[in-house]
Image (spheres, rainbow, N blue to C red):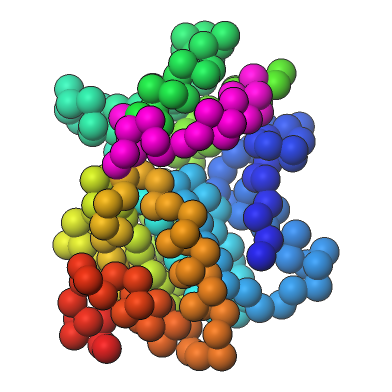
Amino acid sequence: MIAPDIRGCGDSSIPTSKNYTAAAAGADLKAILDYLNISSTYVFAHDKGVGLATSLAIEHPSLVKAIILAEYALPGYGYPLTVQSSSLYQNWQLAFFAVPDAAEFFIRDREKQMLSWYFFHASYSGTAAVSEDHLQRYTNEISKPGFLRSGMEYFAAAWDDEVYFSSVFGSGRRLQMPLLALGGEASFGPVSLLEEVWSQIGDELVAESIPKAGHWIGKTFFLECISAMTEELTATQAMRIQFGLVIAPYASLEKLGR
């Protein structure tokens, strides 16, 4: 399994180009795979990583055998660029983070408080969603000089991403590899919503809501999902068998072709 730190995050460097678009960061993923001499792969992406992974699949469809996209909608295809409600749970933060000068000013020196508040409100299980150790590690990462700002730049790139994805999918193109779209029950969870959003993107779509999950779908589910995909099966079979095993108490097996 390869889990890269995307540009401007974690142990990766801040790009001198200041380009945080999905297409630019997606090209980084291709560079990593080229460096490792990998010519075929399965891809899992969550939140902002979804745009990057989708760009990789657009630009290099023969490289991506199957793709799992969790808890995200692409700009131009469901991603809100403006505050659409006064509700605390309607993704207002996407617009706030998209103005890096303001977001950085208000969050600087309060990184841990912001993360703690955000994890609590976007999770299914409140403060149990993330351990104190992980919370401190995340705080340390975004507190490094320039890294809080670089994280916000991904949100500021949403308008450029909208132009990019609209130019691709608005022309009638679709992802041709099997696509599994996931949403947490307490977040991007209704299957009907996932299907509405992602049917515009891929022709071979399976959409599922993850029970007892918020924005973070959980380490155990993720690892089991990846394990199923790497079996000697077609990608679609792997996805469906995985859901037959993991979601059987909650999902309709008939719907999933099992």
Residue 218 at least partly seen? yes
Q: Nearer the viewer, residue 79 or 93?
A: 93
Q: Nearer the viewer, residue 153 or 232?
A: 232
Q: What residue is drawn where x is 41% and y is 38%?
A: 129
Q: Quadrant of residue 246?
A: bottom left
Secondary structure mostly seen in the magenta stretch: helix
The answer to whether residue 4 is left or right of residue 180 is: right
Residue 55, image x, y percentages:
54, 59
Q: Quadrant of residue 128?
A: top left
Q: What residue is drawn where x is 31% and y is 55%?
A: 183
Tell me if residue 131 is in the magenta stretch.
yes
Magenta span of residues: 121-143
Quadrant position of the C terminus in the picture? bottom left
Disc tally is 0
Residue 120, image x, y percentages:
35, 29
Residue 154, image x, y percentages:
53, 36
Quadrant position of the N terminus in the picture? bottom right
Q: What residue is drawn where x is 55% and y is 53%?
A: 52
Q: What residue is drawn where x is 47% and y is 9%?
A: 106
Q: Nearer the viewer, residue 202 or 162?
A: 202
Q: Quadrant of residue 56?
A: bottom right
The correct choice, above or below, for 106 with respect to 128 in the image is above
Residue 81 at least partly seen? no
Residue 92, image x, y percentages:
29, 27
